[in-house]
Image (tube, rainbow, N blue to C red):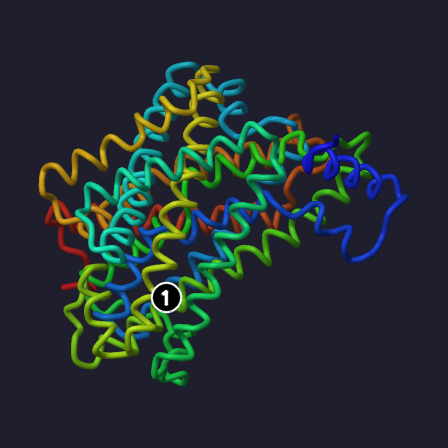
Amino acid sequence: MTTSTERTRAGMAAVLAGQRRGPRSALLFVGPAVIASIAYMDPGNYATNIQAGAGYGYKLLWVVLAANLIAMLFQALSARIGIVTGKNLAELCRDNFPRPVVFVMWVISEIAAMATDLAEFLGGAIGLALLFGMPLMYGMIVTAVVTYGILIFDSKGFRPMELIIGAFVAVIGMCFVIELFIAPVDWSSAVHGLLTPDLPDAAALTIAVGIIGATVMPHAIYLHSGLTQGRAATRDDGEKRRVLRFSNREVVVALAAAGMVNMAMVIMAASAFHAGNSDVAEIETAYHMLTPLLGGAAATFFLISLIASGISSSVVGTMAGQMIMQGFLHIRLPIWFRRLVTMLPAFVVVAMGVNATEALVMSQVVLSIALPVPMIALIIFAGRRAIMGEFVTGPLVRVLAIIGALLVLSLNFVLLAQVFGVPVPGLG
């Protein structure tokens, strides 16, 4: 009996050989970007987007749009190197950089992976604790058990995991479509905020960097290259080119959907809280206030989406952490041990009594600061003809990628200056 992964591989081979055509054929190549997109809808996004919408209304929607466009470019590049080279980004770093540099990159990437898992794990636990009225620690235990159960499917090949994560993405998306119908949205202000860059003060800058960190994810850049390496067997450059076209379309559609979910979060928070409750900054507070403001249905769908986000993104985060360690160090740990190591910081944070939402937001700032490492490595490798051959990035793509990386680096520099008390012109 053939598995779903084997059937998918056979179908892709038939498409590339010209034996199978039609719109449904493209669905065979869908999967890697869908999995990567869950990283752009994780609970860290909930924390930063609630703060953005409640505190500044629709004014920071442009940050979500800019972050999403940067994410599209870098996820497409990550998928590209996996398809063309048959190696993931961490493996390319190990093969091409000096050993001390590789070690430093691995340490930074591991810290980013732990910060990622902190956000994802806490988000799922908060959602379960609020929905079922259980202590946060119990919610964390349930989240750990469920995510481990889903991770078992990773041993069945790539297709089952793609379908499972795709179902979670659909749940999250549907919840926020419903939220937009419930919330009293000022659409003209939303469009203005989407198209007009504005950072009102220093606190808005911190949230903006958090949005960047929650949207453009270091582990997703590493992961996407690993999900595409060897997924579709290609016999020549012509077939690689066809796979790349399928991949680029999937990246645009999947990340556009993720971007719309993020915008919907900000819009919901802006319409529900900004007018009279602009100080709402925590997921728990947002949930409790949604019932009197928008009704019980809005609060329930909010929690369902948060639980789906926390569980699915925790699964994806563990997969990425495994790939990072295997790529940089050539070490593969048992999945249960990897799951245990990455969730420990979340248990420590809760045991110490740290505010869960504050921990979520700060984890996103850590991610934003770690982000330049994979971004710069990706630009270097995608632009090397010795590695990419005829698929090397052209001047326009290279310039856009450099501009995106510089934007992130600049925001990080300004944030660090703010943290260390260095005056930043224009931010008071």
Q: Going 41% across and 20% down the picture, which residue do you hit?
A: 102
Q: Going 85% across and 52% down the picture, which residue do you hit?
A: 21
Q: Going 82% across and 39% down the picture, which residue do you hit?
A: 238
Report the residue marked by disc 1.
301
Within the image, what quadrant is residue 192 found in?
Answer: bottom left
**Residue 163 picture location, percent across and down:** 58, 46
**Residue 414 picture location, percent across and down:** 24, 51
Q: Eyeballing the image, is 68 above or below 216?
A: below
Within the image, what quadrant is residue 232 found in?
Answer: top right
Indicate left or right for 27 with 342 as reference.
Answer: right
**Residue 144 picture location, percent across and down:** 33, 36
Quarter the N terminus occupies? top right
Within the image, what quadrant is residue 101 found in?
Answer: top left
Amino acid at pointer 1: Phe
Quarter the C terminus occupies? bottom left
Indicate left or right for 387 with 144 as reference.
Answer: right
Query: As rendered, which of 167 and 239 lies closer to the eye?
Result: 167
Q: Secondary structure at mark 1?
A: helix
Q: How many marks?
A: 1
